[in-house]
Image: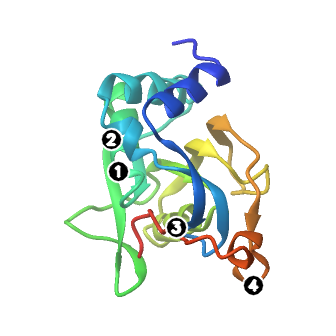
Amino acid sequence: MNLTSSDILHIFKDTGALMKGHFKLTSGLHSDTYFQCAKVLQYPWEAEKICSLIADHFKNTDIQVIASPAIGGIVIGYQVASIMQKRSIFTERKNGAMTLRRGFQIQKGEKILIVEDVTTTGGSVKEVIEVVKKQKGEIVGVASMVDRSGGKAEFDVPFYSTFQMEVINFSPDDCPLCKKGIPITKPGSRK
């Protein structure tokens, strides 16, 4: 699959996944731009196009398991795992801490690719990394549909994103949108 950044941007715009307004991100930061990847994922043929880029990027990497943080990464991780013919698992929060549940296990030395929907600070991915390390798995890479970190997210393993967009984030105390009284919404999975 040979999608350009422009092609991916069109998919995000056409599906309504690229949103403008005043948003509180999962990281706690505020922004005037939000990527609701679930709006792309409701069209499996579009999701497959984008996830194929991740699978292609890591096709020569020894990977046994695709692990994703719930909830945003589940469908993307599953789609990448399907394309690569790998096992797919996800982490989720229990009492606020990221953990493996539902009988998922990582065997010592299993090679893990972590797949996420949107990377802003990399916080969720870092939590998944800790879960994998506790299980003695080996992280071989991280991938996301969208990197909005401005290149600031670092994971000490290869990181690939299908689309990068420089998006300005604000601390809640210094948010010009708040100062203008623009109502804020929190569209993410953690309310």
Tell me the quarter of the picture where residue 57 sits: top right
| Sooner in the amino-acid sequence: mark 1 or mark 3 | 1
Q: Amino acid at mark 2?
A: Tyr
- Label 2 to label 4: alpha-carbon separation: 37 Å
- Quote the CA–CA distance across marks 1 and 2: 6 Å
For disc 3, the marked residue is 133
Q: Position of residue 173 (x, y in %)?
A: 75, 84
Cα separation, mark 1 vs mark 3, equals: 20 Å
Q: Closer to the observer: label 2 or label 4?
A: 4
Mark 1 in CB contact with mark 3 (< 8 angstroms): no
- Between disc 3 and disc 4, the foreground one is 4
Instruction: Give whichever of 30, 71 is nearer the camera.
Output: 30
Task: Name the residue located 74 percent from the left edge and 78 percent from the top edge.
Answer: 179
- Judged left or right of residue 113, residue 121 is right
Any mark on residue 173, and which? Answer: 4
At mark 1, the secondary structure is: helix
Residue topped by disc 1: 74
Q: In the structure shown, which secondary structural element does the residue marked by tag 3 occupy?
A: helix
**Residue 111 point in image, percent of width and height:** 48, 47
Could you say whether the residue bearing mark 4 is in a helix, strand or loop? helix
Q: State which mark lies toward you, 2 or 3.
A: 2
- The structure residue drawn at horizontal position 69% and vertical position 80%, both measured from the top left corner, is 172
Residue at 37%, 73% in the rendered image = 99
Q: CA gap, disc 1 to disc 4?
A: 32 Å
**Cα distance in 3D space between marks 3 and 4:** 34 Å
Give the residue at mark 2.
78
Q: Residues within 10 Å of mark 3 (few under 14, many from 20)?
A: some
Expressed as whole percent of the image width and height from the top left, the position of residue 129 reads 54, 64
